[in-house]
Image (tube, grey):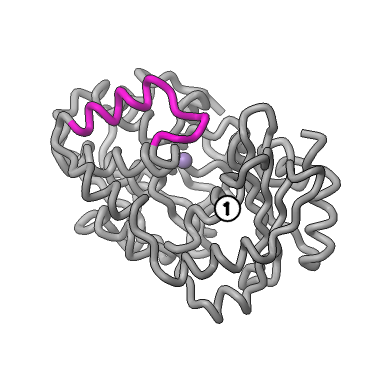
Amino acid sequence: MTELSRIDCANWLLARDHFVLLTHRKPDGDTVGSAAGLCRGLRSLGKTAHVLYNPEITPLYAPLLEGLTKDAPEDGDILVAVDVAADTMFPRSYDHLKNSIDLRIDHHGSGREYTPRELVESDSAACAEIIWELLLDMGVDPDEKMAEAIYVGVSTDTGCFRFANTTAHTFDVAGDCAAVGADIYNWNQKLFDTKSLPKLRLQGWIIDHVQFLEDGKLAICCLPRSVEEEIGVSEDDMNDISSFLRSIEGVRMSALLRETEEGRIKISVRAIPGSNAAAVCEAFGGGGHAGAAGCNLRMTMTEAAEAIGKVVLSY
Ligand SMILES: [Mn+2]
């Protein structure tokens, strides 16, 4: 595997054509924004580029991909994964493509190699930050739609610039996006200031059912699928629900446990600086960032809560 510098990566892309960009399962603002921004940038250079249709795309982010998607790659297409830390993170329908991905562009330091070459900058708060610089390195003249996609990526991965991963560079990129004309107010409103009633009801349920351990430093909540269904929350509602637990006063680390359709337990861990969410999840075969990480366990909810509770505070 070759680790590319950003300039090498820009030149590698410039020397090629016919790109298909891949996003991760449960696509968030960063993977979608990165793919949309890069796709538009490549097109502006006269290249053919598409984002591979992701069956899990939600109504919140779907507009960013309008006119950009393609159902399947064709012979000779170059496959590029953006914001995808491991090949286990792709939607099921991409299984047959896993061995033919040419390049990974990512900001997950704990990611696992699955491509012959990669550009990984783990000090970037969002993959979209790397994409923005890459666009400029390639000589792209950014337009409003590119800026909007990149803004969605950087703002969502930083919780609207509140998380500890936010750097001066994150603000620089967001500032560039604003200067180019991204509709920042509209996106902030949609992403951070509007909550559906089911989401608020679910937050209420979580507050009623959260367990505090270690004098309130650790918050764990087990969320049964039946509760999600009864309240009627959407995937968009669940987007940043795990960060909500960390916002309780005194909590250093939080874990939200959910039941997946495949009968596994999906654990989202969030931590404040000084605690390491990625280390916890790596102990269970998952990964992520120090502030936000995840893993999937094949056990019952009670077993999973016990297992995670034991490990959590050693990190
Ligand atoms: Mn990301």
Q: Tell me: 189 left or right of 78.
A: left
As drawn, 231 above or below 166 = below
Q: Position of residue 186 (x, y in %)?
A: 22, 50
Q: Looking at the image, which is closer to me, 273 or 267?
A: 273
Q: Is residue 59 above or below residue 150?
A: below
Q: Amino acid at mark 1?
A: Ser
With 282 as the anchor, is 105 left or right in this view? left
Label 1: which residue?
242
At 65% from the left and 47% from the top, the residue drawn is 269
In the rendered image, the quadrant that contains the C terminus is: top right
Q: Is residue 46 visible?
A: no
Residue closest to the eye, 208 or 295: 208
Q: Assess disc 1: are there few (<14), some (14-19) or many (≥20) residues with their C-alpha within 10 Å of its C-alpha.
A: many
Q: Is residue 12 above or below residue 240?
A: above
The secondary element bearing badge 1 is classed as helix
User: Where, by quadrant of the figure, is residue 171 drawn?
Assistant: top left
Q: Is residue 164 magenta?
A: yes
Q: Residue at x 24, y 54 (%)?
A: 68
Position of 39 compared to 277: left or right?
A: left
Nearest the eye: 35 or 97: 35
In the picture, the quarter occupied by the N terminus is top right
- On the image, the x and y values in percent for residue 211 come to 75, 57
Residue placed at 69% from the left, 32% from the top? 275
Numbered range of the magenta stretch = 161-178
Q: Say which of 83 and 43 sits in front.
A: 83
Residue 161, image quadrant: top left
Give residue 240's position: percent from left, percent from top.
49, 53
Residue at 61 percent of width and 76 percent of height: 227
Q: Position of residue 75 (x, y in %)?
A: 35, 53
